[in-house]
Amino acid sequence: MNDKFDAVVVGGGPCGSFSAFTMAKQGMNVIVCEEHKKIGVPTHCAGHLSLSGLKRLSLHLPSNVVENEFKGAVLHSPRGKEFSVRFNSPVTCVVNRELFDKYLSNLAVKAGVQYLFGSRVESLVVDSGFAKGVAIRRGGTKEALASSLVVDAEGCSSVLLKKAGLQTLDCSMIVNAVQAEVDRADDVNTNAVEVYLGQKYAPGFFAWIIPKRDMSAKVGLATNMGNPREYLHRFMQKHPVASKKLRKSKITRLSFHPISLGGAIPKTYSNGLLIVGDAASQVKPTTGGGVIFGLICSRLAGKVAYEALQNHDFSEAFLSHYQSRWKERIGFDLAAMRQIRKLLNHLSDDKIDKIIDLCARLGIDSVLEEVGDLDFQGASLIRMIRRPSTLVLTLYSIFSALTTSIWK
Protein backbone atom coordinates (compact mmCIF):
# COMPACT_ATOMS: atom_id res chain seq x y z
CA MET A 1 0.00 0.00 0.00
CA ASN A 2 1.23 3.49 -0.82
CA ASP A 3 2.46 5.81 1.92
CA LYS A 4 0.24 8.62 0.63
CA PHE A 5 -2.75 8.88 -1.68
CA ASP A 6 -4.07 11.77 -3.66
CA ALA A 7 -7.49 11.09 -2.14
CA VAL A 8 -9.08 8.86 0.49
CA VAL A 9 -12.80 8.19 0.01
CA VAL A 10 -14.75 7.17 3.09
CA GLY A 11 -17.55 4.79 2.13
CA GLY A 12 -17.89 2.32 -0.74
CA GLY A 13 -21.53 3.01 -1.61
CA PRO A 14 -22.60 4.49 -4.97
CA CYS A 15 -21.39 8.01 -4.23
CA GLY A 16 -18.08 6.86 -2.77
CA SER A 17 -17.34 4.61 -5.72
CA PHE A 18 -18.45 7.15 -8.31
CA SER A 19 -16.39 9.99 -6.86
CA ALA A 20 -13.40 7.62 -6.65
CA PHE A 21 -13.97 6.51 -10.25
CA THR A 22 -14.16 10.12 -11.45
CA MET A 23 -10.90 11.00 -9.72
CA ALA A 24 -9.05 7.85 -10.78
CA LYS A 25 -9.94 8.12 -14.46
CA GLN A 26 -8.26 11.54 -14.41
CA GLY A 27 -5.08 9.96 -13.08
CA MET A 28 -5.46 10.41 -9.33
CA ASN A 29 -4.25 7.78 -6.88
CA VAL A 30 -7.37 6.92 -4.83
CA ILE A 31 -8.28 4.50 -2.07
CA VAL A 32 -11.77 3.76 -0.71
CA CYS A 33 -12.26 2.77 2.94
CA GLU A 34 -15.32 0.56 3.35
CA GLU A 35 -16.27 -0.68 6.82
CA HIS A 36 -18.07 -3.79 5.55
CA LYS A 37 -16.37 -6.84 4.09
CA LYS A 38 -17.90 -6.49 0.64
CA ILE A 39 -19.67 -3.98 -1.55
CA GLY A 40 -23.45 -3.64 -1.51
CA VAL A 41 -24.14 -5.38 1.78
CA PRO A 42 -26.24 -4.50 3.66
CA THR A 43 -28.56 -2.87 1.13
CA HIS A 44 -29.94 0.53 2.09
CA CYS A 45 -32.77 1.36 -0.29
CA ALA A 46 -35.22 0.14 -2.90
CA GLY A 47 -33.04 1.13 -5.84
CA HIS A 48 -35.79 2.85 -7.86
CA LEU A 49 -34.03 5.17 -10.33
CA SER A 50 -34.97 7.39 -13.25
CA LEU A 51 -33.74 6.21 -16.65
CA SER A 52 -33.08 9.81 -17.70
CA GLY A 53 -30.87 10.26 -14.64
CA LEU A 54 -28.80 7.20 -15.48
CA LYS A 55 -28.48 8.38 -19.08
CA ARG A 56 -27.42 11.82 -17.87
CA LEU A 57 -24.62 10.15 -15.91
CA SER A 58 -23.63 7.92 -18.87
CA LEU A 59 -24.32 4.80 -16.81
CA HIS A 60 -25.30 1.84 -18.98
CA LEU A 61 -26.35 -0.88 -16.57
CA PRO A 62 -25.93 -4.58 -17.37
CA SER A 63 -29.23 -6.42 -17.83
CA ASN A 64 -28.73 -8.48 -14.67
CA VAL A 65 -28.62 -5.30 -12.56
CA VAL A 66 -32.05 -4.06 -13.71
CA GLU A 67 -34.92 -5.93 -12.06
CA ASN A 68 -37.76 -4.13 -13.87
CA GLU A 69 -38.69 -0.98 -15.80
CA PHE A 70 -41.79 1.14 -15.29
CA LYS A 71 -44.00 3.37 -17.40
CA GLY A 72 -45.63 5.11 -14.46
CA ALA A 73 -47.06 4.90 -10.97
CA VAL A 74 -50.35 4.48 -9.16
CA LEU A 75 -50.97 6.65 -6.11
CA HIS A 76 -53.40 5.40 -3.48
CA SER A 77 -54.91 8.09 -1.28
CA PRO A 78 -55.55 7.52 2.44
CA ARG A 79 -59.24 6.78 1.77
CA GLY A 80 -58.91 4.63 -1.33
CA LYS A 81 -58.85 7.07 -4.22
CA GLU A 82 -56.41 6.35 -7.05
CA PHE A 83 -54.41 8.57 -9.37
CA SER A 84 -52.30 7.06 -12.14
CA VAL A 85 -49.33 8.66 -13.89
CA ARG A 86 -48.65 6.93 -17.19
CA PHE A 87 -46.03 7.37 -19.90
CA ASN A 88 -45.72 5.82 -23.34
CA SER A 89 -42.31 4.30 -22.61
CA PRO A 90 -40.36 3.31 -19.48
CA VAL A 91 -39.22 6.25 -17.34
CA THR A 92 -37.81 4.49 -14.27
CA CYS A 93 -36.26 1.20 -13.31
CA VAL A 94 -35.62 -0.75 -10.15
CA VAL A 95 -32.14 -2.16 -9.69
CA ASN A 96 -30.63 -4.87 -7.56
CA ARG A 97 -28.82 -2.59 -5.15
CA GLU A 98 -26.05 -5.04 -4.35
CA LEU A 99 -25.28 -5.57 -8.05
CA PHE A 100 -25.67 -1.84 -8.79
CA ASP A 101 -23.15 -0.94 -6.08
CA LYS A 102 -20.78 -3.63 -7.38
CA TYR A 103 -21.15 -2.31 -10.92
CA LEU A 104 -19.99 1.15 -9.78
CA SER A 105 -17.17 -0.25 -7.66
CA ASN A 106 -15.98 -2.34 -10.63
CA LEU A 107 -15.82 0.82 -12.73
CA ALA A 108 -13.67 2.36 -10.03
CA VAL A 109 -11.37 -0.66 -9.73
CA LYS A 110 -10.86 -0.75 -13.51
CA ALA A 111 -9.87 2.92 -13.31
CA GLY A 112 -7.22 2.06 -10.70
CA VAL A 113 -9.02 2.64 -7.38
CA GLN A 114 -8.00 0.51 -4.40
CA TYR A 115 -10.57 -0.72 -1.84
CA LEU A 116 -9.76 -1.35 1.79
CA PHE A 117 -12.53 -3.52 3.25
CA GLY A 118 -13.28 -3.99 6.92
CA SER A 119 -11.84 -0.57 7.67
CA ARG A 120 -13.85 1.75 9.89
CA VAL A 121 -12.82 5.40 9.68
CA GLU A 122 -12.77 6.90 13.17
CA SER A 123 -11.51 10.42 12.54
CA LEU A 124 -9.71 12.77 10.23
CA VAL A 125 -5.97 13.27 10.37
CA VAL A 126 -5.63 17.03 10.68
CA ASP A 127 -2.47 19.08 10.18
CA SER A 128 -2.43 22.89 10.35
CA GLY A 129 -6.21 23.00 9.92
CA PHE A 130 -6.26 20.74 6.86
CA ALA A 131 -7.57 17.20 6.53
CA LYS A 132 -4.50 15.17 5.59
CA GLY A 133 -5.94 11.70 5.70
CA VAL A 134 -7.98 9.46 8.00
CA ALA A 135 -7.44 7.34 11.09
CA ILE A 136 -8.97 3.88 10.65
CA ARG A 137 -9.51 0.73 12.67
CA ARG A 138 -9.06 -2.53 10.80
CA GLY A 139 -9.07 -5.94 12.42
CA GLY A 140 -8.65 -4.42 15.87
CA THR A 141 -5.62 -2.41 14.76
CA LYS A 142 -5.45 1.34 14.38
CA GLU A 143 -3.63 2.89 11.46
CA ALA A 144 -3.59 6.09 9.44
CA LEU A 145 -3.88 6.75 5.73
CA ALA A 146 -2.26 9.94 4.47
CA SER A 147 -3.77 11.88 1.58
CA SER A 148 -4.04 15.31 0.04
CA LEU A 149 -7.84 15.15 0.13
CA VAL A 150 -10.61 13.27 1.94
CA VAL A 151 -14.03 12.66 0.39
CA ASP A 152 -16.73 11.84 2.94
CA ALA A 153 -19.29 9.48 1.38
CA GLU A 154 -20.28 7.71 4.60
CA GLY A 155 -24.01 8.15 4.15
CA CYS A 156 -26.64 9.55 6.46
CA SER A 157 -24.75 8.53 9.60
CA SER A 158 -21.51 10.40 8.90
CA VAL A 159 -19.12 10.63 11.85
CA LEU A 160 -16.71 13.01 10.14
CA LEU A 161 -19.02 16.02 9.73
CA LYS A 162 -19.08 16.94 13.38
CA LYS A 163 -15.36 16.28 13.78
CA ALA A 164 -14.72 18.63 10.88
CA GLY A 165 -16.81 21.33 12.53
CA LEU A 166 -19.48 21.20 9.82
CA GLN A 167 -23.22 21.33 10.42
CA THR A 168 -24.77 17.89 10.52
CA LEU A 169 -28.14 16.75 9.19
CA ASP A 170 -31.41 18.30 10.34
CA CYS A 171 -32.70 15.61 12.71
CA SER A 172 -36.24 17.01 12.56
CA MET A 173 -36.34 16.16 8.84
CA ILE A 174 -35.13 12.56 9.08
CA VAL A 175 -37.52 9.66 8.56
CA ASN A 176 -36.81 6.03 9.29
CA ALA A 177 -37.38 3.57 6.46
CA VAL A 178 -37.89 -0.17 6.32
CA GLN A 179 -37.43 -2.14 3.10
CA ALA A 180 -38.66 -5.70 2.61
CA GLU A 181 -38.07 -8.11 -0.25
CA VAL A 182 -41.12 -10.35 -0.69
CA ASP A 183 -41.40 -13.50 -2.77
CA ARG A 184 -44.66 -12.53 -4.51
CA ALA A 185 -47.26 -9.81 -5.00
CA ASP A 186 -50.67 -10.55 -6.49
CA ASP A 187 -52.79 -8.43 -8.81
CA VAL A 188 -50.11 -5.81 -9.45
CA ASN A 189 -49.30 -4.09 -12.72
CA THR A 190 -45.63 -4.87 -13.33
CA ASN A 191 -45.38 -1.70 -15.46
CA ALA A 192 -46.08 0.63 -12.52
CA VAL A 193 -44.88 1.39 -9.03
CA GLU A 194 -47.57 1.64 -6.36
CA VAL A 195 -47.44 4.44 -3.77
CA TYR A 196 -49.66 4.50 -0.67
CA LEU A 197 -50.33 7.65 1.33
CA GLY A 198 -51.82 8.09 4.78
CA GLN A 199 -50.96 8.79 8.39
CA LYS A 200 -52.24 5.40 9.55
CA TYR A 201 -49.66 3.42 7.59
CA ALA A 202 -46.74 5.78 6.87
CA PRO A 203 -46.95 9.02 8.86
CA GLY A 204 -44.65 11.69 7.49
CA PHE A 205 -43.90 9.89 4.23
CA PHE A 206 -45.47 7.04 2.20
CA ALA A 207 -45.42 3.30 1.57
CA TRP A 208 -44.64 1.53 -1.70
CA ILE A 209 -44.83 -1.69 -3.65
CA ILE A 210 -42.25 -2.01 -6.43
CA PRO A 211 -42.91 -5.14 -8.52
CA LYS A 212 -40.17 -7.08 -10.24
CA ARG A 213 -40.47 -8.97 -13.50
CA ASP A 214 -40.61 -12.33 -11.70
CA MET A 215 -43.65 -11.17 -9.67
CA SER A 216 -41.67 -10.78 -6.47
CA ALA A 217 -41.57 -7.24 -5.11
CA LYS A 218 -39.93 -4.67 -2.88
CA VAL A 219 -42.28 -3.40 -0.20
CA GLY A 220 -41.42 -0.61 2.16
CA LEU A 221 -42.28 2.63 3.88
CA ALA A 222 -40.77 5.41 5.92
CA THR A 223 -42.16 7.18 8.96
CA ASN A 224 -41.28 10.14 11.16
CA MET A 225 -42.66 8.46 14.27
CA GLY A 226 -42.95 5.07 15.90
CA ASN A 227 -41.41 1.77 14.86
CA PRO A 228 -41.15 1.33 11.07
CA ARG A 229 -41.26 -2.47 11.43
CA GLU A 230 -44.65 -2.25 13.16
CA TYR A 231 -45.96 0.10 10.48
CA LEU A 232 -44.77 -2.31 7.78
CA HIS A 233 -46.61 -5.24 9.34
CA ARG A 234 -49.73 -3.11 9.65
CA PHE A 235 -49.43 -2.03 6.01
CA MET A 236 -48.96 -5.56 4.70
CA GLN A 237 -51.66 -7.11 6.88
CA LYS A 238 -54.29 -4.39 7.37
CA HIS A 239 -54.22 -1.95 4.45
CA PRO A 240 -57.51 -2.44 2.54
CA VAL A 241 -55.76 -2.50 -0.86
CA ALA A 242 -52.15 -3.52 -0.22
CA SER A 243 -53.02 -6.39 2.13
CA LYS A 244 -54.93 -8.15 -0.67
CA LYS A 245 -51.91 -7.91 -2.96
CA LEU A 246 -49.54 -9.11 -0.23
CA ARG A 247 -51.71 -11.66 1.56
CA LYS A 248 -49.59 -14.59 0.31
CA SER A 249 -46.26 -12.79 0.45
CA LYS A 250 -43.34 -13.98 2.52
CA ILE A 251 -40.56 -11.58 3.52
CA THR A 252 -37.20 -12.90 2.33
CA ARG A 253 -35.04 -9.93 3.34
CA LEU A 254 -35.51 -6.93 5.62
CA SER A 255 -33.40 -3.80 6.02
CA PHE A 256 -33.65 -0.45 7.79
CA HIS A 257 -32.15 2.93 7.01
CA PRO A 258 -32.68 6.63 7.76
CA ILE A 259 -33.60 9.14 5.05
CA SER A 260 -32.75 12.84 5.31
CA LEU A 261 -35.47 15.05 3.80
CA GLY A 262 -34.13 18.42 4.94
CA GLY A 263 -32.16 19.36 1.85
CA ALA A 264 -28.39 19.69 1.64
CA ILE A 265 -26.31 20.74 4.63
CA PRO A 266 -25.15 24.40 4.46
CA LYS A 267 -21.48 23.66 3.83
CA THR A 268 -20.16 20.62 1.97
CA TYR A 269 -16.43 21.38 2.02
CA SER A 270 -13.60 22.29 4.34
CA ASN A 271 -9.82 22.44 4.10
CA GLY A 272 -8.87 19.15 2.45
CA LEU A 273 -12.41 17.73 2.71
CA LEU A 274 -15.44 17.29 0.42
CA ILE A 275 -18.85 15.85 1.45
CA VAL A 276 -20.97 13.96 -1.06
CA GLY A 277 -24.28 12.09 -1.28
CA ASP A 278 -26.34 11.24 1.78
CA ALA A 279 -23.65 12.56 4.10
CA ALA A 280 -24.32 15.98 2.55
CA SER A 281 -28.08 15.27 2.43
CA GLN A 282 -28.12 15.71 -1.35
CA VAL A 283 -31.44 13.89 -1.33
CA LYS A 284 -34.81 14.82 -2.84
CA PRO A 285 -37.05 15.93 0.04
CA THR A 286 -40.19 14.94 -1.86
CA THR A 287 -39.37 11.28 -2.51
CA GLY A 288 -36.24 10.50 -0.50
CA GLY A 289 -34.37 9.68 -3.72
CA GLY A 290 -30.66 10.25 -3.33
CA VAL A 291 -28.84 8.11 -5.87
CA ILE A 292 -29.07 10.29 -8.98
CA PHE A 293 -28.46 13.62 -7.23
CA GLY A 294 -25.73 12.03 -5.13
CA LEU A 295 -23.95 10.68 -8.21
CA ILE A 296 -24.21 14.06 -9.96
CA CYS A 297 -22.55 15.71 -6.96
CA SER A 298 -19.97 12.93 -6.64
CA ARG A 299 -18.88 13.47 -10.23
CA LEU A 300 -18.57 17.20 -9.60
CA ALA A 301 -16.54 16.51 -6.45
CA GLY A 302 -14.20 14.27 -8.41
CA LYS A 303 -13.60 16.95 -11.02
CA VAL A 304 -12.94 19.66 -8.43
CA ALA A 305 -10.59 17.30 -6.58
CA TYR A 306 -8.55 16.83 -9.74
CA GLU A 307 -8.39 20.58 -10.31
CA ALA A 308 -7.27 21.06 -6.71
CA LEU A 309 -4.48 18.52 -7.23
CA GLN A 310 -3.37 20.25 -10.42
CA ASN A 311 -3.26 23.59 -8.60
CA HIS A 312 -1.74 22.15 -5.40
CA ASP A 313 -4.52 23.92 -3.54
CA PHE A 314 -6.82 22.02 -1.18
CA SER A 315 -7.95 25.08 0.75
CA GLU A 316 -11.57 25.95 1.53
CA ALA A 317 -11.35 28.79 -0.93
CA PHE A 318 -10.57 26.45 -3.81
CA LEU A 319 -12.75 23.52 -2.75
CA SER A 320 -15.73 25.87 -2.44
CA HIS A 321 -15.99 25.55 -6.23
CA TYR A 322 -17.52 22.14 -5.57
CA GLN A 323 -20.43 23.65 -3.66
CA SER A 324 -20.91 26.38 -6.24
CA ARG A 325 -21.15 23.78 -8.99
CA TRP A 326 -23.53 21.38 -7.32
CA LYS A 327 -25.75 24.26 -6.24
CA GLU A 328 -25.85 25.51 -9.79
CA ARG A 329 -26.81 22.02 -10.92
CA ILE A 330 -29.37 20.91 -8.31
CA GLY A 331 -29.63 23.70 -5.73
CA PHE A 332 -32.88 25.22 -6.98
CA ASP A 333 -34.55 21.83 -7.26
CA LEU A 334 -33.54 20.82 -3.74
CA ALA A 335 -34.88 24.11 -2.35
CA ALA A 336 -38.17 23.78 -4.26
CA MET A 337 -38.62 20.17 -3.17
CA ARG A 338 -37.92 21.10 0.45
CA GLN A 339 -40.78 23.59 0.34
CA ILE A 340 -43.06 21.01 -1.25
CA ARG A 341 -42.10 18.53 1.48
CA LYS A 342 -43.02 21.08 4.17
CA LEU A 343 -46.40 21.59 2.52
CA LEU A 344 -46.99 17.86 2.29
CA ASN A 345 -46.10 17.34 5.94
CA HIS A 346 -48.90 19.72 6.93
CA LEU A 347 -51.59 18.13 4.77
CA SER A 348 -54.27 16.08 6.44
CA ASP A 349 -55.39 12.79 4.95
CA ASP A 350 -58.65 14.47 3.93
CA LYS A 351 -56.81 17.17 1.95
CA ILE A 352 -54.57 14.60 0.25
CA ASP A 353 -57.71 12.71 -0.79
CA LYS A 354 -59.19 15.85 -2.35
CA ILE A 355 -55.96 16.78 -4.14
CA ILE A 356 -55.55 13.33 -5.70
CA ASP A 357 -59.18 13.35 -6.75
CA LEU A 358 -58.77 16.78 -8.40
CA CYS A 359 -55.54 15.77 -10.13
CA ALA A 360 -57.25 12.71 -11.58
CA ARG A 361 -60.34 14.63 -12.75
CA LEU A 362 -58.40 17.55 -14.28
CA GLY A 363 -55.94 15.38 -16.20
CA ILE A 364 -52.75 16.48 -14.47
CA ASP A 365 -51.24 13.14 -15.47
CA SER A 366 -51.05 14.24 -19.12
CA VAL A 367 -49.31 17.47 -18.06
CA LEU A 368 -46.71 15.48 -16.18
CA GLU A 369 -46.10 13.34 -19.23
CA GLU A 370 -45.49 16.39 -21.38
CA VAL A 371 -43.33 18.61 -19.18
CA GLY A 372 -42.34 16.74 -16.03
CA ASP A 373 -38.77 15.82 -15.16
CA LEU A 374 -38.53 13.04 -12.62
CA ASP A 375 -35.25 14.23 -11.11
CA PHE A 376 -35.36 18.00 -11.50
CA GLN A 377 -38.79 18.60 -10.02
CA GLY A 378 -38.12 22.26 -9.24
CA ALA A 379 -37.49 23.05 -12.89
CA SER A 380 -40.57 21.00 -13.82
CA LEU A 381 -42.62 23.10 -11.42
CA ILE A 382 -41.66 26.31 -13.22
CA ARG A 383 -42.69 24.85 -16.58
CA MET A 384 -45.96 23.54 -15.21
CA ILE A 385 -46.97 26.88 -13.72
CA ARG A 386 -47.39 28.09 -17.30
CA ARG A 387 -50.14 25.53 -17.82
CA PRO A 388 -53.79 26.51 -17.39
CA SER A 389 -54.05 24.44 -14.21
CA THR A 390 -53.97 26.35 -10.96
CA LEU A 391 -50.74 26.86 -9.04
CA VAL A 392 -52.00 24.85 -6.10
CA LEU A 393 -52.76 21.83 -8.26
CA THR A 394 -49.41 22.21 -9.96
CA LEU A 395 -47.59 22.13 -6.62
CA TYR A 396 -49.34 18.97 -5.57
CA SER A 397 -49.13 17.30 -8.94
CA ILE A 398 -45.34 17.44 -8.53
CA PHE A 399 -45.92 15.18 -5.55
CA SER A 400 -47.57 12.71 -7.85
CA ALA A 401 -44.26 12.43 -9.68
CA LEU A 402 -43.39 9.70 -7.22
CA THR A 403 -42.40 7.73 -10.26
CA THR A 404 -39.00 9.18 -9.45
CA SER A 405 -36.57 7.23 -7.29
CA ILE A 406 -37.93 5.95 -3.97
CA TRP A 407 -34.38 5.94 -2.50
CA LYS A 408 -32.67 7.26 0.35
Image (spheres, rainbow, N blue to C red):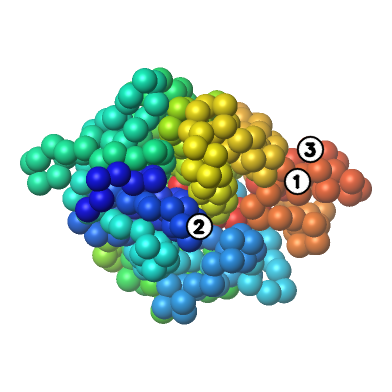
Q: Residue at x 50, y 57 (%)?
A: 26
Q: Is residue 338 above or below residue 41?
A: above
Distance (Cα) linking label 1 and label 2: 31 Å
Tell which tag, 3 or 2, sits nearer the viewer. Answer: 2
Which residue in the structure is indicated by mark 3? Answer: 392
Which residue in the structure is indicated by mark 1? Answer: 379
Instruction: Identify residue type, mark 1.
Output: Ala
Residue 396 seen in the current view: no
The answer to the question of whether label 1 and label 2 lie on touching residues, with beta carbons closer than 8 A, is no
Residue 219 percent coordinates (x, y): 40, 58
Residue 302 seen in the current view: yes
Q: Residue at x 50, y 28 (%)?
A: 315
Q: Is residue 291 above or below residue 322?
A: below
* Local secondary structure at mark 1: helix
Q: Earlier in the sequence, mark 3 or mark 2?
A: 2
Residue 274 percent coordinates (x, y): 46, 36
The answer to the question of whether label 3 and label 2 lie on touching residues, with beta carbons closer than 8 A, is no
- Towards the viewer: 164 or 281: 164
Q: Is residue 354 above or below residue 109?
A: above
Which residue in the structure is indicated by mark 2? Answer: 26
Q: Residue at x 68, y 74 (%)?
A: 89
Q: Quadrant of residue 266?
A: top right
Q: Residue at x 32, y 51 (%)?
A: 31
Residue 10 percent coordinates (x, y): 34, 43
Distance (Cα) linking label 1 and label 3: 16 Å
* Local secondary structure at mark 3: helix
Q: Earlier in the sequence, mark 1 or mark 3?
A: 1
Q: Is residue 263 left or right of residue 328?
A: left
Instruction: Identify residue type, mark 2.
Output: Gln
Distance (Cα) linking label 3 and label 2: 46 Å
Tell which tag, 1 or 3, sits nearer the viewer. Answer: 1
